[in-house]
Amino acid sequence: MSDERTDQAEARTRTRAEIDLDAVRTSVAALAARAGAAATMAVVKADGYGHGMLPCARAALDGGATWLGTAFLEEALALRAAGITAPVLCWLSVPGERFTAAIDASIDLSASAPWTLREIAAAARSVGRPARVHLKADTGLGRAGATPADWPALCDEAAALQAEGVIEAFGVWSHLAFADAPGHPTVQAQIGVFRDAVAIAEKTGLTPTVRHLANSAATLVSPEAHFDLVRPGVSVYGLSPGPEVGPPGRFGLRPAMTLVSHAALVKRVPAGTGVSYAHRYTTTGDTTLAVVPLGYADGIPRAATNLGEVLFAGRRRRIAGTVCMDQFVLDIGDDAAAAGDEVVLFGPGGRGEPTADDWAAALDTINYEIVTRIGTRVPRVYR
Ligand SMILES: *Cc1c(COP(=O)(O)O)cnc(C)c1O
């Protein structure tokens, strides 16, 4: 597998995702500046939002992040296996998770429920070292975290286990539902519930060192949500967390990924030619078609059929017909092109190519989904 990826990376004629690590460093520095006195945790889950976890984690640390965040334990362990020693928090576990491995590797763990604390404590007893835990409050997202009704019991359990010396309740944290809608009333409401949760934890005798609530959007536009630590993810990679927050350049963010391919075939066809599966596109005149060797198995959404745009042969072209597993087609009219010519699917936008934001807008999704779904057949090439 890794050999194949290397071969592909060396055969740069087909497809690659170019990752500009300087853009990651610049974007993280901009986020850390916004965070002010708060520390910055770069979220590198989902293979660094599709950009490659390890190179981006290192670039983020170079850019001024002092923490890394992952969803899953496997991701956190991979950071440690690569020799990264910065504090790492991972936050999504199920019963039976390998908490001993996490504690051995000095990975901070999250707990939303007493069962998690008890499993972490059992693992800590067997390792012979306390586990660092961040207690998660559900302040209104309605996802992970203990509800206000369940929060006191979670704090009590944590206080008892801390007194026993098996856990250290190092953090209290939560996550926002509408951070990408600046001024949305739930943001202030969640901050209020969060402050209450911290106060209850302190009344229980806990003295959390870090309180954290802010994702990228709140890092950029809601300073009152910064507390001690911010957790930007998508903006680490230079992307805006949403159109209402503003374009990335407004915040000094630089999109890091450029998805490039090359035409596999260019050919003339007559008017009335049905193009790709189910002929969802038919040529209206004699024209030139170009076949691009990327498909839905590579993360090009099939929903981009007749919708997605790319830069090819000097201008934007809309995908003609159905996006297939491995390829899609462009209709370039009478313009000149040849097999091997470059196709830019998206990038920072400076060369006239679409951006991940453009793809998201065209497909009624978010830029996060566009970049994270780029598949394993696409080699990441670092600049
Ligand atoms: C993914 C995630 C983040 C980062 O969110 P962005 O919107 O990408 O900045 C922060 N915190 C938690 C809990 C997450 O799941």
Image (cartoon, rainbow, N blue to C red):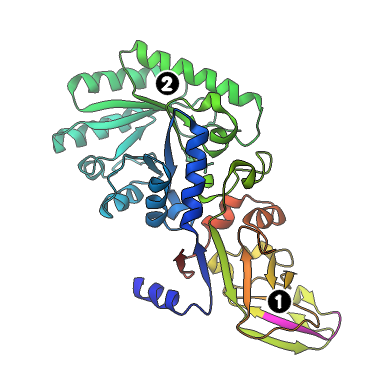
Residue occupying the point 76% across, 78% down: 332
Q: Is residue 162 left or right of residue 357?
A: left
- Which residue is labeled 1 in the image? 313
Residue 174 in view: no
Where is 38 relative to 269, above or below?
above
* Residue 73, horizontal then vertical, whole percent: 33, 46
Residue occupying the point 68% across, 76% down: 329
User: Whole-Å distance between the Cαs marked 1 and 2?
Assistant: 59 Å
Q: Is residue 38 left or right of residue 353?
A: left
Q: Residues within 10 Å of mark 2 (few under 14, many from 20)?
A: some
* Residue 204, horizontal then vertical, whole percent: 33, 13
- Which residue is labeled 2 in the image? 150
- Give the residue type that dot 2 points to: Asp
Task: Identify the image quadrant of the N terminus.
Answer: bottom left
* Residue 214, horizontal then vertical, whole percent: 50, 32
Q: Cβ of disc 1 within 8 Å of ligand 1?
A: no
Image-quadrant location for residue 347? bottom right
Q: Earlier in the sequence, mark 1 or mark 2?
A: 2
Q: Is residue 312 left or right of residue 261?
A: right
- Give the residue type that dot 1 points to: Ala
Please tell me which residue lies in front, 288 or 20: 20
Which stretch did the figure color magenta?
284-290
Where is 191 relative to 349, above or below?
above
* Residue 296, horizontal then vertical, whole percent: 58, 67
